[in-house]
Image (spheres, rainbow, N blue to C red):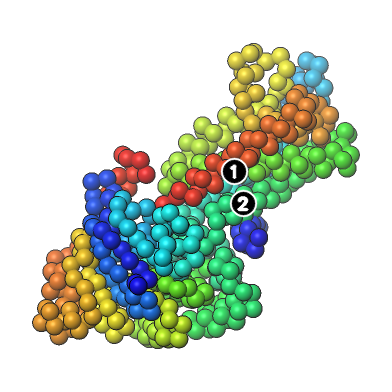
Amino acid sequence: MPIIDVKKLTKKFGNFTAVDGVSFSVEKGEIFAFLGPNGAGKSTTIKMLTTVLRPTSGEIDLNGYNPVHDALSARKSFGIVFQDPSLDDELTAYENIELHGVLYGVPRELGKQRAEQLLKFVELWDRRDDLVKGFSGGMKRRLEIARGLLHHPKILFLDEPTQGLDPQTRNHIWQYIQNLNKEEGITIFFTTHYMEEAEKVAQRVAVIDHGKIIDGGTPDELKKKTNAATLEDAFLALTGHDLREDAATGADHMRAGAKVWGRR
Amino acid sequence: MQAIYIIWLRQLKRYIRSKSRIVGSLGQPLLFLVALGFGLGPVFQKAGGGNYLDFLAPGIIAMGILFTALFSGIEIIWDRQFGFLKEMMVAPISRLQIMVGRTLGGATVAIIQGIVVFLLAFLVGFRPEYLTFGTFLLALLFMFLIAVLFTALGTAIASQLDDMQGFQLIMNFVVMPLFFLSGALFPVAGLPSGIALVVKLDPLSYGVDGLRHALTGIAQFGFGTDLAVLAIITAVLLGIGTYLFSKIQI
């Protein structure tokens, strides 16, 4: 039985359909990549899976729970690293981690141990008592990832986790995540724009564009199907070469418009 | 419990670290105490109202609490803009726990603010001669109720707003009317019936009255009514606030 099962999931903002009848499933213990150009509907889908956005229609089964009707149980099943910042700037790095540990019920001693290990891992241990507002973009990103890995959920959502990080750090972090997946059987659901990353890490991928899933399978299957040498070529063959409007402008503007004129 | 505590602690840390906010929020109460207390004092005395500063000070303490509490609630908008709200919304704890933690945090900060305004008033010349240890505890209880009520109200309002553009609206159409029509500045007795009705519909009126009663012995509605009204409205607003908070989408 799949641990994530999505059927005909749709989200509309006013007249704009961000996610259009999407169906897919992720097996337990799998590393699954959700790929698509900017504005394709990746983040909107993740928001619906993680209970912070209500679907217009369709069904989601997350570890046996419905994120809409049984949000609390669903929340207990996953952890997430968001695409955009979600740290408290007025707290220190360590306080952010500590708060997360308490919210997720990580036992105190274990939390302390992991906090030290993870902060050292992302090379922020020396800066642990500094306020986050003084951190650079890359440091904040690393802290977000460390925080997201503090508790070990059944499913881990990573929304463009390595965006803006250098190749060394990216490699380092993916090794850690793959290890978590292997040793604890944590299901990994991630999005990325780095296709070589997806090709290397993901066991299965789904490609979404304009709110619809256009293809899916293992990276090898996709490459074979499109006669491409790399996953990046396969991705481009599937989604075309047109430039997309950035998600933060296109979809968000339409969402903002929908909010002004309609009920939220 | 742990989760409520850590959310409470977060609010407190944020408050203590924002020095400019603490200092800035004391300017207004001080101005009111000095300008109104001394400016209107002689007229009030001549009209047979007694010492105006004694009458005014509890109202200004309530004002300090009202402002701080509402803004603590409204901080959700900042959390939304800076992204931290997401972290809170996906946390595997009940929305009521988040609401209680936030509200108690906001209330604690507001009570600290109220006590500081109390000390300011004392410096300016406020002498609460009625005050005993017992009535001080009672005053604290009223400060607590005012603080919780308006933190919950702030949260309820803020959960409906996306950005800071609604802020001015809240200031002009919620905070200012609540304060000016609460009996903080003038006695309720002998008001024209229209205004008297509005004052009676303003929940802050009961907070001001209870606080003034506890500190100076001057009372309008009586402790029983004050407590009952505040407790009921607080419970209702906490319920509404929790509901609206749980409906927030990102």
Disc number for residue B100: 2
Residue A92 in view here:
no
Residue B236 appears at what percent x and percent y?
A: 60, 38
For label 1, the residue is B238
Callout 2 and callout 1 share a chain: yes
Q: Circle 2: is it few (<14), some (14-19), or many (20+) Cα within 10 Å? A: many
Q: Nearer the viewer, residue A184 or B145?
A: A184
Given contact means CB atoms under 8 Å apart, are the residues at marks 2 and 1 in contact? yes
Farthest residue, direction left: A227
Amino acid of disc 2: Val
Q: Tell me if residue A213 can be seen.
A: yes
Q: Which quadrant of the figure contains the N terminus of chain B? A: bottom right
Which image quadrant is residue B120 in? top right
Residue B134 spot, x, y in % from top left: 87, 40
Residue at 84%, 29% (x, y): give it. Answer: B217
Residue A119's spot in the image, x, y percent?
53, 80
Residue at image location 18% in from the left, 67% down from the top: A214
